[in-house]
Image (cartoon, rainbow, N blue to C red):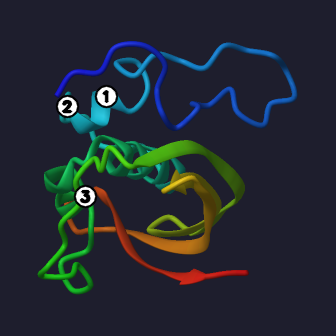
Amino acid sequence: MKQAGECPCGGASQGSGSAKRPPGYVECCGRFIEGGSPAGNAMELMRSRYTAYVLGNTAYLRATWAAATCPRDLETSADPATRWLGLQIKRFTPIDADHAEVEFVARYKLGGRAFRLHETSRFERDTNGRWRYVDGDLRD
């Protein structure tokens, strides 16, 4: 499922106030999704999970979701009718060494209508030291 070009998440250059070019997929989220490298923190995991949604990579989403909260019927596919417009990280809050929150807005179009998903997500590091998505609260 190799992807060429810019990473869908917008990369670490986002929000820096400069006009940096977004990193390539392979250097950004591809190293987690396809390369098997673990995310170093909850924000990297959040970005890679957004990219996995854009690409329809359900296997990666399952692998990075806490077992206790992962839905059994999780299924996503890259719906050609859905056009992802971008990810904005609003806040990254490390709580302690094993817990963090990321507030984000993901924008997309479906059937010509624009939507936004605004969520504060909770992440925890598992016993193997890998970050996992636990759950989130939708915001207005």
How many angstroms separate mark 2 from mark 1 (CA)? 5 Å
Q: Is residue 5 above or below residue 117?
A: above
| Residue 30 disc label | 1
- Secondary structure beneath dot 3 equals helix
Q: The residue under label 3 is which amino acid type? A: Leu
26 vs 56: above or below: above
Local crowd size for mark 2, using a 10 Å CA cut-off: few (<14), some (14–19), many (≥20): few
- The crowding category of the residue bearing disc 3, from other C-alpha atoms within 10 Å (few below 14, some 14 to 19, many at least 20), is many
Residue type, mark 2 in image: Glu
The label number, if any, that marks residue 61 in the structure image: 3
Residue 6 drawn at (x, y percent): 49, 19
Q: CA distance from mark 3 to mark 1?
A: 13 Å
Q: Amino acid at mark 1?
A: Gly
Counting residues from the N terminus, which is met first, the one under dot 3 or under dot 1? 1
Question: To which residue does mark 2 refer?
Answer: 34
Q: Are marks 3 and 1 in contact (CB under 8 Å)?
A: no
Q: Which residue is situated farthest in the right direction here?
A: 17
Contact check, label 2 and label 1, Cβ < 8 Å: yes
